[in-house]
Image: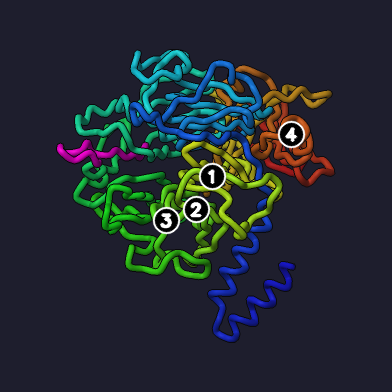
Amino acid sequence: MKTLRAFLALSLILNGAGASSACADEFADLVDGFGTTTRLIGTHQTTTTDPGTGEAINFWDPAYEGVPAIFAPLSNPHMAAADAFGNVYIADKASHSILKISADGLIHTFAGTHVAGFNGDGPAPATQLQINNPNGLYVFADGTVYILDPGNHRIRRIDIDGTMTTVVNDPDPKWYPSGRALWVSPDQQLIYYTNEIAPEPPSVLADGALVKQWTPAGGIEIVCSRDEGFRNPGNIAVNPVDGKLYVCDRAEDDVLKEEIGLWRIDGPGQRTRMTGNINEQLAASGQLALHSFIDQPRGIAFRPDGSYFICGHKNGSIWFVDTTGVLHQYIRGKGTKDTYSLPDGEHPPLLATDYFCQPRAITIAPNGTLLCVCNDSGFVFQVNSVAPPVLPADVQVEHFGADGLRFGWTGIFGHGYIVERTFGLEAPAWDVIGAVNGVGGLTEFLDAGAGSVPQAFYRLLPAQSGTGGANRAALVGSTSTVSTASTSSTPTTSSSSRKRVIHFSGSRRRTFSPM
């Protein structure tokens, strides 16, 4: 099939039609890399708004704790993202909590008390601290979670031991208790987020929005002020190719729809439109995204080559934008609520009918699976990745000393790597000691405890799906292995070309060989 596509691409290039063939081939490869759909959680509700208060209904009940997630309701969820171990985290706005679907498919409260409020910044167990309308989420491969807590004007961090702390306390008195966007850099030293500005009475609509950043040295700084025109930003992401921040602006309060679109931030106070305005043609496959109107774009997720998925709240569909900027409809939906009819086991593209409504976030898990949140009733589904895992072939030691062992490899953006360790290869007992997100370059892991042991062996595994131990066992054969030995610097060899080993002694030069 790939040979045929390559032949067709060459033929069209010679006839002056290379661009369209290239994007079709790119989309075909994308389709081949994904499998079928699976609903993770969600039940339909007759109404999601309290008629007395006008507020979204909190459907959580303690009886749901630990039950299969497919039987549990959500409460106006806004975001879902996964770690490398197959756990999925959901910002469940109206239940004032972060929920976690563990790899065995069960639902748990991960953060919050299910009651809106504020009772401290921590550090404290995440399930003991109140949060208020959480609707932004950023998850690292090792299970470290950042949440946007707009009702409390805070950004919180939940460590892998379940301890919550406050990282950002934004005192802006005009921060309306909304804002959905959150992005954290791989070293956790840069955070982008947005906040909507409180209405000016008698209006009840947000008076625009700000894009902000936080760093430990500079604190909170404005990236784009109200004057740049943002109204109701949705999700944000940084393009791994150009390194720039992209902002989805749903602009639901813009009656003229002039500010609706995907925007690239080119510098402080500078933005460039990446999808068409209201005067452009409605989105359709084969059109350039720049000249296609996607009504209320809300979710975006980049792939390593800079292509991306985008979904539109009022447009209703999930789209793929290839590296040439061409749109491809991936799953069709609608912009009016509140239905969900997407069967499990379907292979996208799915265009025959409206399968769901109002998608509000999309992310790509560390194992390559696509996650989508849709509907006020609240459904989270995934499109499983079937692309074979790509493991690094250039693992090498970067540093070894009293502070531990740091080794690195050329990572792939967005891919997750699980790190395991054993102290001997005779009937080894491998223990998980962490996970790390791949970046488009040097990816590193530090084992701080390695300096106190005479010998240790390490291996890398690809990020897991939520299918339990069977999937994990199947992947053990595809590993990259690093070994430390204090008694020898002689390389060892083995017949397996899929493993790599490093032997070194003290501060002597490391040697690197196949194992």
Q: Position of residue 280 (x, y in %)?
A: 36, 68
Residue ID for mark 2: 334
Q: Distance between the residues labelled 2 and 3?
A: 32 Å
Residue count near mark 4 (Cα–Cα under 10 Å), binned few <14, some 14–19, many ≥20: some
Q: How far apart are marks 2 and 4 (CA)?
A: 37 Å
| 279 falls in the magenta region | no
Q: Position of residue 85 (x, y in %)?
A: 63, 31
Q: Quadrant of the C terminus?
A: top right
Q: Where is residue 455 in the image (x, y as percent from the top left)?
A: 70, 23
**Which secondary structure lies at badge 2?**
loop
- Between disc 3 and disc 1, the foreground one is 1
Residue ID for mark 1: 339
Q: Distance between the residues labelled 3 and 1?
A: 37 Å
Report the number of discs. 4
Tag 3–tag 1 contact (CB < 8 Å): no
**Which secondary structure lies at badge 1?**
loop
Mark 3: which amino acid? Asp
Q: Residue at 60% across / 64% down in the picture?
A: 26
Q: Residue at 74% across / 34% down in the picture?
A: 472
Give the residues in magenta: 191-205
- Residue 472: which numbered mark, if any? 4
Tag 2–tag 3 contact (CB < 8 Å): no
Q: Where is residue 361 in the image (x, y as percent from the top left)?
A: 47, 44
**Which secondary structure lies at badge 3?**
loop
Q: Which of marks 3 and 4 is nearer the N terminus?
A: 3
Tag 2–tag 4 contact (CB < 8 Å): no
Q: Which of marks 1 and 2 is nearer the N terminus?
A: 2
Q: How far apart are marks 1 and 2 (CA)?
A: 9 Å
- Residue 242: which numbered mark, if any? 3
Mark 4: which amino acid? Arg
Tell which of 384 and 185 is nearer to you.
384
98 vs 349: above or below: above
